[in-house]
Image: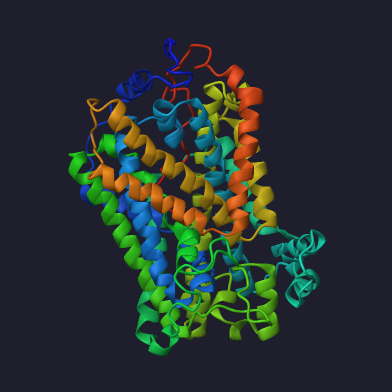
Amino acid sequence: MDMPNVTTPTTNGWRVKSLDAILLTAQKKGLHRSLGAFQLTLLGVGAVIGTGIFVLTAVAAQKAGPGMMLSFMIAGFVCAVAALCYSELASMVPVAGSAYTYTYAVMGEVMAWMVGWALVLEYALGASAVAAGWSNHAVGVLDSIHLHIPQILNNADALNAKIAMGVGFAPTEELRHAALTGGYINLPAVLIVIAVTLLLIKGTTESARFNAALVIVKLTALAFFIALALPLIHTQNFHPFMPTGLSGLPGGAGGAGVIGAAASIFFAYVGFDAVSTAAEETINPQRNVPIGLIGSLAICTIIYILVAAGAVGAIGAQPVMDAHGLLLPADSGALHARCAVLSPDLALQPLVCSKEPLVFVLQSINHGTIAWFVGLAAVIALPSVVLMMMFGQTRVFFVMARDGLLPPAFAKVHPKYKTPYVVTAVTGMFALIFAGVLPVGALANYSNSGTLFAFAMVAIAVMVLRVKDPTRKRSFRTPMVWLVAPLAVIGCVVLYVYLDVASQLVLVGWGAAGLLVYFLYSRSRSHVGLGLTEVHELDADVPQPPVPPFTGL
């Protein structure tokens, strides 16, 4: 049940949601502090490791070659400074809505709307990316037991190639080959999104013990990979170490270079908010939250570097060029067509050609059984990641609808299942379309563009709130905030600049569409604009996630 409405004045024309009203919600919840640094670190490791390392290793290799090892370090650093900012606001405003709610309380409604709108890219397209990555592994596992999904139904390379040529791209040998041999829809990705959408609508609860088992499955698979690949390192496979340079060209072919690869594999680190949002349940959060955040990110970075070193050292990871010596976009139909030209035998193609890079490496070093296990681990563990990403999307839209910024139907709760079924169905439709027609690398980049924008806004919000409300209680304070927060903003901006042009334009175009929706619909219906702030985010009638957010990205 909603609490009594609280009148919220506007300040200099900016509609700011009352922070005091929002905090009434947190007071209602009354969380018990029981988590220490060790538990937080384990929580962070489980939440972060997942799709990025299983799928995006080949994408990073195509952009940076062996230099992708530096890319993991850069992405981890940017994520760490952003996480420290995120934690301060999470400890102050431990309610639903994530960065959207924080921004509403600090910078006002317009910026909050833009952050919430950007989170659609993070969550919905992130779910699509995970679904596409799951499809790659599912197809591989099925092939290994002689159940073959037709090429026309397990990717959309032909569709994308024909669209590219239709809008004016030169009909290169790679595009023509992709148009003739590729598929038109990634059916397994579509089916897993449909299954997850139905599960979210039904609201089936899985146990935390089961989710912990999935984390163990992922970590075990990676441990096997590291143990088998590292002893086979050949130093010559690391030369040249940075074949595309440190920075490549901003917005160039696939956002190439070490920094361009870092911009793509930033997706591999998203999920740390499982740590930052646990600040209210943490013993001595001022000490333990940064230990949990930095510790989990450091462990994940080390694991990622070891995996990258094993992949590079065992079989090499140099980028593939076109017939004219130009770098091909990662995970594209043109790249896969070029790979087929180089060698029709999949087993003889370079690492960057594989859609299951870790499985490919293990197969190449004659560990087929373990390779099958790693592929199966991805198939088992990744659907729950799709679920959590889609849940995050529905949760943000649900809160925005309750604030009056989206149609009331988005806040409808199913009479039987007590879940926000309308917004869940809309999110599922959105996710399955993109999962069905776009490759995982492009989807991850599009998701990253929204994530980077949201993280930058959180870092700015921390600095603004330190000036506007310096005396307010903070369970966790960002250390060296005037250094850490600007570094977070700069890091997010730099990684955004080094995304490919399409990903940059997706955020710009999506943002422009969002502003149009806001001024034509949302502004006149905003509850804050009407003088009402409803404190409801964690009321008992708001649907809770069907699984704890510990399963990783």
Report x, y in % for residue 325: 63, 81
Q: Nearer the viewer, residue 132 or 503?
A: 503
**Is 170 on the left-hand or right-hand side of 279?**
right
Residue 391, position as x, y percentages in the image: 51, 40
- Compared with 307, 121 (above or below) is above
Q: Residue 35: give x, y in percent of width and height.
A: 23, 42
Which residue is pictured at 29% across the width and 53% down the height?
42
Scheme of image coloration: rainbow
Q: Residue at x 71, y 67 (%)?
A: 149
- Quadrant of residue 141 in the image? bottom right
Q: Residue at x 45, y 51 (%)?
A: 493
- State whether residue 161 appears in this view: yes
Taking depth in this image into account, of 335 and 149 the one nearest to the observer is 335
Quarter of the figure with residue 401: top right
Give the residue at x 47% y 74%.
Answer: 245
Side (left or right) of 207 relative to 393: left
Q: Evaluate whether residue 129 shows in this view.
A: no
